Image: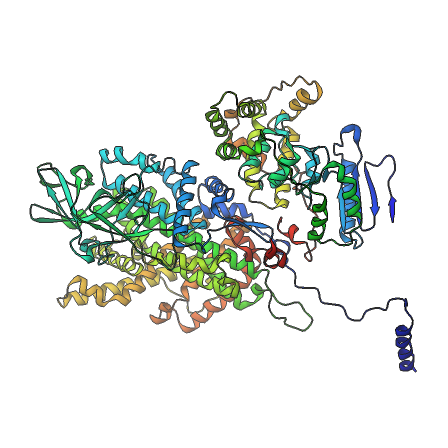
Amino acid sequence: MASSVSSQHDEVLVEEKSFARILTLNRPKQLNALSFQMVSRILELFLAYEEDPNVKLVILKVSILNGIVMGGGNGASMHGRFRVATENTLFAMPETAVGLFPDVGASYFLSRLPGFFGEYVGLTGARLDGAEMLACGLATHFVPSAKLPMLEAALCEIDSSDPGFISSIICQYSEQPSLKPQSVYNRLDVIDRCFSQKTVEEILSALEREVVDPRDDWISATIRTLKKASPTSLKISLRSIRVGRFQGVGPCLVREYRMVSHVMRGEFSKDLLEGCRAILLDKDKNPKWEPSKLELVTDTIVDRYFSKVKDEDWEDLKLPVRSKFNLPPHVVAKL
Amino acid sequence: MDRAYQRTRILTNHLIPNSPAQTVCLTSNECLSYSPPELSEKYAFDVGEMRRLMDGHDVEERDRLFGLIIQSKLFNPRVRGGKVFVSPDYNQSMEQQREMTWKRIEYLSERGVFRGWMTGKGEDVEMKRFACFEVLGLFDHSISIKLGVHFFLWGGAIQFFGTKHHHDKWLRDTENYLIKGCFAMTELGHGSNVRGIETVTTYDSNTGEFIINTPCESAQKYWIGGAAKHATHTIVFSQLNINGTNEGVHALIAQIRDADGNVCPNIRIADCGHKIGLNGVDNGRIWFDNVRVPRENLLNSVADVSPDGKYLSSIKDPDQRFAAFLSPLTAGRVNIAVNAVYQSKVGLAIAIRYALTRRAFSLKANEPEVLLLDYPSHQRRLLPLLAKIYAMSFAANYLKMLYVKRTPQSNKTIHVVSSSFKATITWSNMQILQECREACGGQGLKTENRVGHLKAEHDVQSTFEGDNNILMQQVSKALFAEYVAAQKRNKVFKGLGLEHMNKPCPVIPSQLTSTTLRCSQFQMDALCLRERELLNRFVADVSQCLARGESKEHSFNTNYQLAEDLGKAFSDQAIFQTFVEAEATLAAGSLKDVLGMVRSLYALTCLEDVTYLRYGYLSVDNAAAVRGEITKLCSELRPHALALVSSFGIPDAFLSPIAFNWVDANSWSSVQH
């Protein structure tokens, strides 16, 4: 039984197919940038589905990552149980370039990547393809885009929520793609050596020490990217990932909410405004960061981003109370 | 009529298919499912603030090292119940465990973790080093010991027994692990009695060399960590015979392996073999057969030998010389004491988290089974130990500060306090781990659940770096000496926390109300009273023996039981003092309130000790009141149990599967992966 329950103006399209629900983000002109209406609608649907025994599987057509998935798109998809990449997938968390920091729970999922790859991805905004996402665990499966319609059809036939069973269905359409020879994922030893350093300054020094072969552009490009990013963003992002490594997803979201509140209020820096202007609006790609240098961003300044906002009208993010009973094990493991 | 109708309906349903589904009368019970404690327990105070108070220093440094360990494959990460845990694979052979320990050390060295540990100076460097050891101790005792031997013992000997030319020659290479050091003091025949060791060294003035010898089998060096496989150099402790005179125990540097790992000539090395735990440390035995080392290899900060063979020392008295000699070893003792606190924290975090999710027996039929930690008996087993570890934690921070701020005048105090705390904390560690193991039932026997295994790994703590019994005896001897000195000083006590002896003797009220029992002044009075009375008794009894013409040593040996009780009284009071001081730094609020309850539970548990009734410091009624108050405090602290163990700041990966979703960790699907 298939039916659509959406109108032209809905920013989230919903299809019901037996025990599956397919949610499709519907703001193509804005590249599906998440809006308040989208997020509210998705939350509303998720809360309803949790209580509904007739819903056993939700497919978020971002979690089938057949295209660009960046920023908020990752927030919507990376926390899902299954993330299916294709040969078209392009992943990035590019926030440090515009004066923000990898949010939407990135401090949780980036910090769990192997070695210090998470720090690398979060600080540089590096772009990863589907094969790389699978290799590092950001994606759970890789399915060629040509097989997506068949996969979707097979998923809509399921009548069980058992993750093992669903995974086996996805596996029937999956492949093991090889990494490109020049993939950054082949450089994990260098990445770990450099991005395990204590501070952003030491990470840069370590990278500079690694430049041995002038033809090896990758390290030089990484250094350039870091030098172009907002110094404040780099420092708060690094701490966010490092602290997030030891926190469950809930505390990560609460902490990131404090950080983004401070960023939005522009209390200590207006880098987000300047970044958006330079990269997105005027597109001169020449942002003037303030503070302009890493040394000027002290630990005390960084500390402030992690504290509560001093405003009567502000309060910490309150997550919905979950039922104590019958939470699936993979959810419990993330708390 | 009803019955006939019912029967007809049933028969109809049998005969006619597709009849509407009947309401099923039987509902299956929901399977036992795991519910994380975070969902049902609340935090009444800021856990981050409590953590900073308990760790005391270098929180970021600790977190960085946690991250380096968790993110590397070398530390044996395993996924259980959807979470990553790191812990050595103790199922590996002894040889494999030793190799892995070494690989981990190499990795940490490459990541710059040890930078500045030998060449840096100052309190900050020393505190940071303590913090790193506390973190490493959470992962594995073997790596902690191997590094401790190399940095605190070998490196510390160079720093404190050696002089400038030793520092210039050895410290940098030590820090960069270009050489691997070990520490050959203990022999088969002599451990606690260092002055009795039998290795002997003479001097050849023709060649300007010392000659080191192992004259008999009991003189072989034993339990030398690092010696069996990896160490290239060692500090050798030996009697020094110069011109026919035995000048006592001295320390020299000797190379035992070359850069390729081959044992040097004139040196024999054997393995101590498999141990009940700590198999990642390659303990070795060493024999020296006329080993010649250059004159410069004598560590000469206290005494020296001239090129033409004359013995020189600024300290004439051999006893004093020996004491000056050994005092630098305190760092190792401090390290052991403070480390032991953290292993107890792992045990308690696991046992308490488990007890917050594991159920057994219902009080009434059809009710859910009761959580382990909701039983008063289970609370009584674990919560006083939790209070104890809070106390030990503050004591450890005090000890570290005392050590890094050391002066020549404070050396004696540091020796007494470090001896007392090392013995008390390591004994307590064994007690806590045993109880935690039992509290986890059968799950406590699984190595991967860590709690039980920690016991075997850390058992050695009670006898190395000073046998605990000997250390406590030294405490009582020091208190005796202080008493005698005070008598000469117009009976004014100064130092070793004995100032309370200058005040009138405290009085215990005959009626002990709840308010009184929870008052820190009363608690301090009770602890000081016991120490005061026992010290008076001990001095009196020892003096009686001395008056009868017995030697000091014999008098102490005869009164060993009082000495033990006195040592314990000193420790409890000193530890409590640090707790009160830490509590005083807090602003009023829920954190201070909860900490106050923890402090009371610790104090009252000390007052339950048998000495209070044995010597009559508390009446039987008093003791009953104390006992009753402890039970009350346990139930009041029950709601804070999760917050109190979360405040340890130990990442989930360093606990074990039973502290989390132990149902999923044991599921069939996890077997298949």
Q: Nearer the viewer, residue B6 or B427?
A: B6
Q: Residue furthest left?
A: B244
Figure check: B605 above or below B236:
below
Taking the image as shown, residue B516 lies to the left or right of residue A316, namely left
Q: Position of residue B621 (x, y in %)?
A: 44, 73
Numbered disc total: 0
Question: For residue B264, which quarter of the picture?
Answer: top left
Figure check: A229 above or below B542:
above
Q: Residue at x 38, y 51 (%)?
A: B95
Q: Position of residue B152 (x, y in %)?
A: 32, 44
Quadrant in the picture for the N terminus of chain B: bottom right
Figure check: B585 above or below A121:
below
Q: Is residue A310 visible?
A: no
Q: Nearer the viewer, residue B143 or B381?
A: B143
Q: Position of residue B583 (x, y in %)?
A: 46, 50
Q: Nearer the viewer, residue B458 or B430?
A: B458
Q: Nearer the viewer, residue B86 or B286?
A: B286
Q: Residue at x 47, y 27 (%)?
A: A210
Figure check: A334 above or below A292:
below
